[in-house]
């Protein structure tokens, strides 16, 4: 088994009491940093799953197959949350959202994902949750 030793610094945001930096081995992950990421998977909330030096980052606004520039919004000792600042290379599965409220109401998390790929991903979620 591969484990990463995590050391938590005492750097906390006074506003919301969340970490602003996490030291993972020799690697420091900080809120506000930007990274170029390749998105390999999707989670059940419609966020792309990417990795930064092995650390999982859930990226809102990205889909599987995208290469994006993303900014770290939140860090924990186990993962990071990030948001797209620029799409560098669009996924072959990326489509225009059919719903004019996509991104505003939160009802369609997979709105920019090709319907066939969306169905495949959701079938995998169902299978692994049995």
Image (cartoon, rainbow, N blue to C red):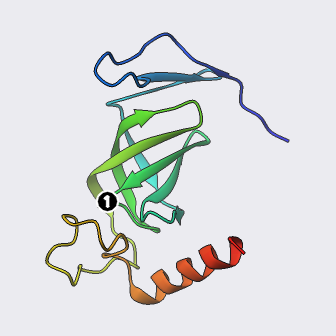
Circle 1 crowding by C-alpha within 10 Å: few under 14, some 14–19, many from 20: many
Q: How far across and down, in percent of the image, does residue 38 sit? A: 47, 56
Residue under the point 31% across and 31% down: 32
**In the image, residue 34 above or below residue 119:** above
* Residue ranking furthest to the bottom: 116
* Residue ranking furthest to the left: 100
Q: How far across and down, in percent of the image, does residue 49 sit? A: 51, 56
Q: Please give left or right for residue 70 compared with residue 77 in the image.
A: left
Classify residue 121 by image quadrant: bottom right
* Residue ranking furthest to the right: 1
Residue on which disc 1 sits: 61
> Quarter of the image containing the C terminus?
bottom right
Residue under the point 42% across and 43% down: 81
In the depicted view, which residue is nearer to us: 90 or 97? 97
**In the image, residue 124 above or below residue 50:** below
* Residue ranking furthest to the top: 10
Per the image, label 1 sits on a secondary structure element best described as: loop
Q: How far across and down, in percent of the image, does residue 88 sit? A: 31, 58
Q: How far across and down, in percent of the image, does residue 77 sit? A: 58, 30
């Amino acid at each position: 088994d591969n484990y990463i030793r995590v050391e938590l610094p005492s750097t906390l945001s006074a506003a919301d009491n969340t970490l602003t930096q996490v030291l993972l081995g020799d690697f420091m992950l900080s809120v506000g940093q930007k990274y170029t990421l390749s998105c390999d998977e999707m989670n059940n909330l419609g966020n792309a799953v990417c990795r930064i030096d092995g650390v999982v980052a859930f990226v809102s606004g990205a889909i599987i197959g995208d290469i994006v520039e993303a900014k770290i919004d939140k860090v924990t000792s186990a993962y990071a949350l990030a948001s797209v600042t620029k799409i560098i290379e669009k996924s072959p599965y990326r489509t225009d959202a059919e719903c004019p409220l996509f991104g505003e109401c939160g009802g369609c998390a997979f709105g920019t994902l090709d319907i066939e790929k969306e169905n495949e991903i959701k079938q995998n979620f169902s299978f692994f949750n049995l």
